[in-house]
Image: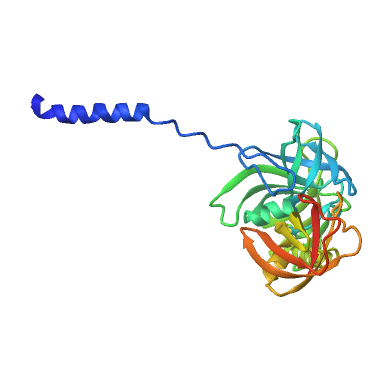
Amino acid sequence: MLIKSLPILCILALTSLQAADAPAVPAKPVLKIKPGQVIVPTDAMRRIWGELVSMDLKTRTGTFRKEGTDEIMPFTVLPYAELYHQAAFGDLQDFRIGVRAIFRMHESADGQWTWLTYIQDQMNMMFGHKEYFHVDAIDAAKGTFTVTQASLDKSFIREKNILISTDAETKYWLDGKPATFADIKVGQALRTETHGIGKGKTQMCWNVFLDDASLLQFQSAQKALNAKRLADEGAPGYTDTVDGTMLELTLFQESGDTSRALKAGQKVRVAPAGVDRKAIGTPVTGTISAARMQGNLGKATVTLDAPATGFVVGGVARLWR
């Protein structure tokens, strides 16, 4: 038996030697943000619940208060950041000061956690995850109710014993029409749009949606607003290449409807944009020579009717169709 087992032992030994001699598998490189490219380092990010404190639309910067510690954190919104407002795409001007949201942060070039790649308000978070607040108890005198955050059938429970507050400014909606606090019932599944109060973890309601129809009405209004904004201001994206009359663009995720509609031979207008993503100068005309989707991003090659001016590789551009 010992003799018969020798070949096997030799094979095992040889395999071990080969494994020892084999080069080590390199670690997967950590993604880093590079200006002018759409990169979201999901392996190096912080998603922080907070309350919007300030915002400058011209510089696309601001601050938020971190829930739990009350630390004031600065942020710079990257041009391609996903801004989710009322369960749809939006832009910075849509967010009210005080809104409770998740701020997705990354390290900047100087090692500070200030670069932001999304703001996701509570409505979008709960809608996207198909979660609700299930009402467990109501205190009409205090204008509060206690809830469990979970899926509709409660097969998934995220958190229990959450206190939701209301005040004189809170609005209630049922079947898309105004309702009242008295319409909230124990056992009901609802959603909210909340804001902070400058400290702690208070969830104060701006809006209470007592059914899906009411939330969807707000979502539809936000979608219409954003569609009109893109039609008026152009679909935003990065300039990848500028070569005479040839322009290559990467259109951001919010430009998805425009990107998917682009076809070769289609006439478009394009213009460079500034830090505030507003178009600079008069748009120039051109023709789409190639277009495709790369994941959620649009890739478009435009042959301009005249040599491009003002476009900078890595800079923001706007496209109208």
Residue 298 spot, x, y in % from top left = 68, 61
**Does 42 sit left or right of 304 as displayed?**
left
Give the position of the C terminus as an image quadrant.
Answer: bottom right
In the foreground, 255 or 165: 255
In the foreground, 197 or 63: 63
Residue 117 spot, x, y in % from top left = 73, 46
Question: Residue at (53%, 52%) from the top-left corner?
Answer: 155
Question: Residue at (77%, 40%) from the top-left corner?
Answer: 50
Q: Residue furthest top?
A: 2
Question: Residue at (79%, 49%) from the top-left corner?
Answer: 194
Can residue 185 be seen in this snapshot?
no
Residue 4 spot, x, y in % from top left = 10, 29
Which image quadrant for residue 181?
bottom right
Relative height, residue 101 to residue 270 (above, below): above
Can residue 252 be seen in this snapshot?
yes
Which image quadrant for residue 310?
bottom right
- The color scheme shown is rainbow
Give the position of the N terminus as an image quadrant.
Answer: top left
